[in-house]
Amino acid sequence: MPKAKIAPSMLSSDFSNLASEASRMLQCGADWLHMDIMDGHFVPNLTIGAPVIQSLRKHTTAYLDCHLMVTNPLDYVEPFGKAGASGFTFHVEASKDNWQELIQQIRSKGMKPGVALKPGTPVEDVYPLLDGENPVEMVLVMTVEPGFGGQKFMPEMMDKVRALRKKYPSLDIEVDGGLGPSTIDAAASAGANCIVAGSSVFGASEPAQVISLMRKSVDEVK
Ligand SMILES: O=C(CO)[C@H](O)[C@H](O)COP(=O)(O)O
């Protein structure tokens, strides 16, 4: 299994101090910064877009792991590439007929392509995006309904993670929603290695301890 990547979800940060919140998380041991992009249409919430990524990029060289919860991901590829996004993860539900073009465009803008799936979407729906000539490099299994932080982890999503890990031993598999000290072992033992965590990290008195505990849980899995 690939090594742990712990990605605090900046959705739980103080957006009015984004650069210092990002730097605080990196000092606490974060590998990536997870950026939740919501368009108020694909999900019932509206967050940030490319201008905010561009502003943050001026303050950090960190890997910006962008999760696009948007209806038309192709429209976002060029602006996110220019803004300095590192990873561009789109939803399979929003890319039924243009995922090949999406993957190709994302790569051509220097970003790492990933695909996300909602809790109600079968894992088999992402297999064509992994088995083709130009596969995505990460699958994000949502462990809550996308849209809001602070929800309860859905353990039944671990069947999807197990199926992916069995079929793709070296794939980056990310989980997002309700991850923290009480749920990390279930996710890690199922085979997830990229861990997004918002409330559990930002709400902790010692975020570094939570990050380190989650890393240990993932890296101990053989
Ligand atoms: O994508 C998201 C919501 O759509 C968030 O990244 C996710 O919910 C993380 O927050 P928390 O750890 O508080 O559940």
Image: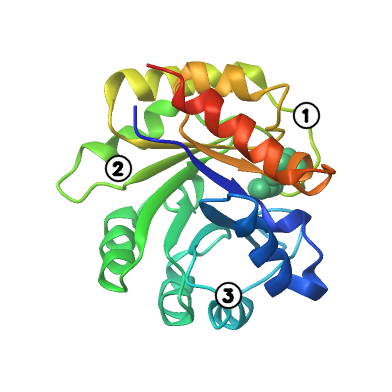
Q: Earlier in the sequence, mark 3 or mark 1?
A: 3
Residue type beneath disc 3: Ile
Q: Are marks 2 and 3 in contact (CB under 8 Å)?
A: no
Residue 7 in the figure: left or right of residue 137: right
Q: Nearer the viewer, residue 199 or 218?
A: 218
Quadrant holding the C terminus:
top left
Ligand 1 in which quarter: top right
Asked if the beta carbon under badge 3 is closer than 8 A to the nearest atom of ligand 1, the reply is no
2 vs 3, front mark: 3
Query: Image height check: is 87 above or below 150?
Result: below
Mark identifier at residue 129:
2
Please state which of residues 122 and 198 is positioned toward the viewer in this rendering: 198
Residue 180 position in % (x across, y down): 70, 31
The answer to which of 33 and 82 lies nearer the viewer is 33
- 103 left or right of 26 in image: left
Q: Where is residue 57 drawn, in percent x and y? A: 53, 78
Give the residue pinned by disc 3.
Answer: 53
Give the structural element (helix, strand or loop) at label 1: loop
| Res. 145 in view | no
How many tags in the picture? 3
Instruction: Give x and y (percent) for residue 87.
Output: 43, 59
Do we see residue 150 in this rendering? yes
Q: Which mark is residue 152?
A: 1
Local SS, label 2? helix
